[in-house]
Amino acid sequence: MTIPRGPAIMLALGLVLLLDVLRVFLPSLITLFGRAGETPPELMGLYAAAWFILPFLALLAKPRHALLGGAAALVLTRILLQAGVSQLHVASAGVTAGLVFLYGCAHTVPRRAVPVGVMGGLSLSLIVHLLLDGVDLVWRDGLVPWLAALCVCAAFLSLLRPPAAEVDRAPALTWFLLGPAMLLTGVAATGWAKPEDGPPALWQVIMGTGLIVLVLVAAGVRAVRPPSSPVLDLGAGVLLVLCAVTFLFESFTSAGALLILWLGFLLAGTVRPERPGGRRPGVAVLGGGLVFFVGLFVYYAAYDMSLGFPNGLILIVVAVLVAALTVVKALAVDSSAVQERAPGGWLPPAVAVLLVGLVTLGTPSAPPVRAKQGDTFTLIAYNIRMGYGLDGRLSLDKIGAWAAAQKPDVVLLSEVDRGWLLNGGHDDLARIARRLGMRYHFAPAADQVWGDALLTNLPVKQVHSHPLGAHDYPTGAQAQTVVLEVGGREVGIVNTHLQAPEGQAPEVAAIARALAAGRDADEAGRGAAGAGEQVRRPVILAGDLNTRPTDPAMEVLKAAGLSDPLTAFGDPPTSPADAPKERIDHVLLTKGLTAISAQAPRLPYSDHLPVLTTLRLTSVDQEG
């Protein structure tokens, strides 16, 4: 028996639209509803949960009406998001619309079309997201993104044909697992640790993106060819859990994408023939949506509150749930039931190879290292808030364009996200670095894909990241210690984003003092130099210090020999960006450096303003 292609493609495209909406809804919670932590997390959670609970009202409607109404509303919200209309509220409504659509699908899509549609939709969405460099069509202006979005919506609506008669529905378990599948694939496909120094070599791009694309397509193929034995389900379940365990390790890499393959394998097995009756697939798919929400919320809440356990355990629990349910299901089905297997083919692997080729064609070569002549250089320090502007829209390209126009020699970035599903699953650093044509050095803080970064084409002699103490603040912090050359002279840089200034300021002060005394970057965090030790190397301490010039933490930094040159240039405030009242972003200098100019340009690309400075090297015997 062949797979009903129309319903499978319809389901896949519906999931693509829903995931597009989710990648707007989730960051909008942080940037628009949450607004830089001003909103209590409990209130934010209640707001988000409401849009996953509202779809249960679909239980009062006929499945046919839920299918059509949910699909129409999903398309409408997707088009409004492309137009930038009321982003937060439209995306919120879009999440509810998408879940109502899935409720209708659970009652109207034939059994054999479900795993293909589910894994096909997840695979297609993530592959397109990868090809677009993480900047989805919804964030892009111009005619081409509009046409592409309209074509997807039109194709989806053209396939929207509810069956005239009762269909052989997929089991409730298949639909319930959609929520956990969205969580696991969403985190695994973009949340792997990227190379800290870049841009990556071509072979790294091929290995990283190629593995992800191949695994996603293989998962889709596996959904077409269900496993024939419960033993295979058991093996796939064990491998799924083992892959989820890799999230407990900071060295987690793209190999974790194998998790998605076993997920597709297990999902395919849930559609084995079973006795009809006693199934409530509509309730199951909505329940799976709640699992997605709760799992995602708790997973990322670990960066704002102490859970008492590693947040990777959330993914392991979800993986165990998926594995246990599918294995129990496989054992309960009559082994003599005929397994209908759709034919495979060479097309999916060929498409995967083509997609990998397209990704590698867009990979730039590493910019050359350029020595700086003279004694002046330009530095930018900017907290980019994961790339989201005051309007809640992704502003990575605007940030890169503005920074490039300043012709900086060094760029320091805070709140750099390289793959959190919560923020849309994009690599801020790689995108901005390409705009600037610069090499980069990433310093993980909260985890391997969230932290701080330095971008420069100057000769870099040493780079090391020193973890800072938590001081009862769960979001991780670090001090990226760098030694580079300007005009043949060494300059030290401490790039940091303080989360708990009272406790962390003394730590970075000690690191800056040791670096100024001539310590290597990797040794600066081990043994601090004495307070009276001579300055042998000029040092810059910069970033979002969450410290006002009059705070006690600033006095600690000044006592370490650091001065605040911005006070001589009007003491410009940097936060909040729309109505700046206080300066918490700084560029502090030791002896041997003086500021020629300093400003905080009024830009709407983050909730902070950048600090743009031109610095000059002087003798360390002079006051900087």
Image (cartoon, helix red, strand yellow):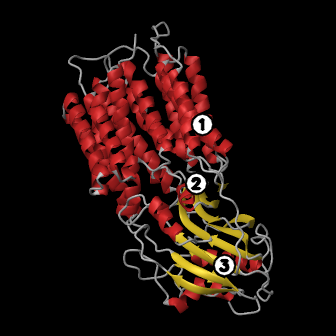
> Residue beneath label 1, please?
210
Residue 327: horizontal and vertical position, in percent?
52, 23
Reading the chain from its start, which is encountered first: label 2 or label 3? 2
Label 3's element?
Answer: strand
Marks 2 and 3, how far apart in space? 25 Å
Residue 205: horizontal and vertical position, in percent?
62, 43
User: Is residue 349 positioned above or below 436 on the image?
Assistant: above
Residue 449: image tag: 2
> Residue beneath label 3, please?
540
Instruction: Pick the quarter of the image with the C terminus.
Output: bottom right
Label 1's element?
Answer: helix
Q: Is residue 284 left or right of residue 382?
A: left
Q: Which residue is drawn at 40% across and 46% down?
A: 293
Number of residues whose C-alpha sits closer than 10 Å to that of mark 3, classed few (under 14), some (14–19) or many (20 or more): many
Q: Do the residues labelled 1 and 3 touch (CB within 8 Å)?
A: no
Reading the chain from its start, which is encountered first: label 2 or label 1? 1
Identified by mark 2, the residue type is Val
Identified by mark 3, the residue type is Ile
Q: Which residue is drawn at 55% across and 22% down?
A: 233
Instruction: Pick the quarter of the image with the N terminus.
Output: top left
- Choose top left, top right, bottom left or bottom right for residue 69: top left
Marks 1 and 3, how far apart in space? 40 Å
* Viewer-closest of 452 and 412: 412
Q: Which residue is drawn at 50% across and 48% down?
A: 133
Label 2's element?
Answer: loop
**Is residue 215 in view from this perspective?**
no
